[in-house]
Image (tube, helix red, strand yellow):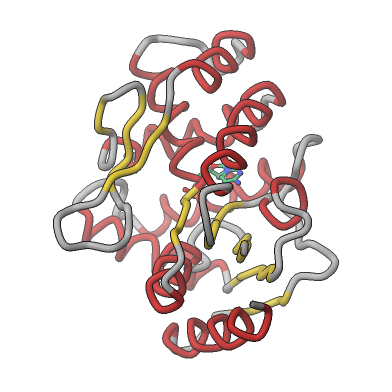
Amino acid sequence: MIIAIDGPSGAGKSTVAKAVATKLGFNCLDTGAMYRSVAWYALEHGISLDDASSLGDIAANRPISFGHCEGDPVPRRVFIDGEEVTDVIRTADVDRSVSTVSAHPCVREALLEQQRRIASEGNYVIEGRDIGTVVFPNAELKVFLTASNEERARRRVLQNEQRGVGSVDFEEVLADILRRDELDSSRQNAPLVAAEDALLLDSTGRDIADVIEEICERGARAC
Ligand code: C5P
């Protein structure tokens, strides 16, 4: 069974996806971390963000994997080509670059293949931008999670503070998520858009535990 959770940056997808997966005993997959890993690899190796062929080559040939911290059921550790990138994929540099990288069709094709392969291994909660529309259009439950721009920026600042990585300047973070929303929504290939049959949830001002509960109930019904 697949539960797809799509939506813009900072809507709470990661928190919600991980909590729903833990409650339902599902695996979870953060597809944003995969795009971030490709972007980080490109920056690290001096590859231009316009070089579609080299970026596609990274996505196809530098395997991305996930790992657990001891005692944690959620796979929060991220690796590309065997190197751990859990923290470095959250820097402001990667924030600025990732939407350019993810707009290249060859990058998307290669990662889509990996995402489908990973999720063929069992029940998954998968978070991203195009999971319910493109990667798993037959997902048993599709959620499109949003929140106001200001709330999303506030949450992202808090998350960056807790992680100790990324910008903690509200205006800078707000500008970045608005810019990424625009790029992600306007690209030709697999844009950020709600699937027609998605449950639309606005988490603005809502207790996140409530949102998690609602998705778990729907998920249990869809089983
Ligand atoms: O979710 P997160 O903010 O980590 O995603 C980073 C970026 O990866 C997004 O802004 C988007 O450009 C890209 N992405 C995507 N498709 C997905 C997941 C993420 O294009 N399924």
Q: In this view, does 174 lie to the left or right of 79?
A: right
Query: Image quadrant for the C terminus?
Result: bottom right
Residue at image coords 41%, 71%? 25
Check the image and report above or below for 188 versus 202: above
- Spot occupied by residue 138 in the image (x, y as percentages of width and height): 77, 58
User: Foreground: 203 or 173?
Assistant: 203
- Spot occupied by residue 121 in the image (x, y as percentages of width and height): 51, 49
Dividing the image into four quarters, tell me where ligand 1 lies: top right
Residue at image coords 49%, 31%? 97
User: Foreground: 106 or 172?
Assistant: 106
- Spot occupied by residue 108 in the image (x, y as percentages of width and height): 65, 31
Residue with the most extreme right position: 196
Q: In this view, does 97 lie to the left or right of 50?
A: left
Check the image and report above or below for 83 versus 173: above
User: Foreground: 196 or 171?
Assistant: 196
Check the image and report above or below for 171 versus 67: below
Check the image and report above or below for 51 versus 27: above
Residue with the most extreme left position: 70
Residue at image coords 28%, 45%? 67
Residue with the most extreme front position: 121
- Spot occupied by residue 70 in the image (x, y as percentages of width and height): 14, 56
Residue at image coords 38%, 36%? 65
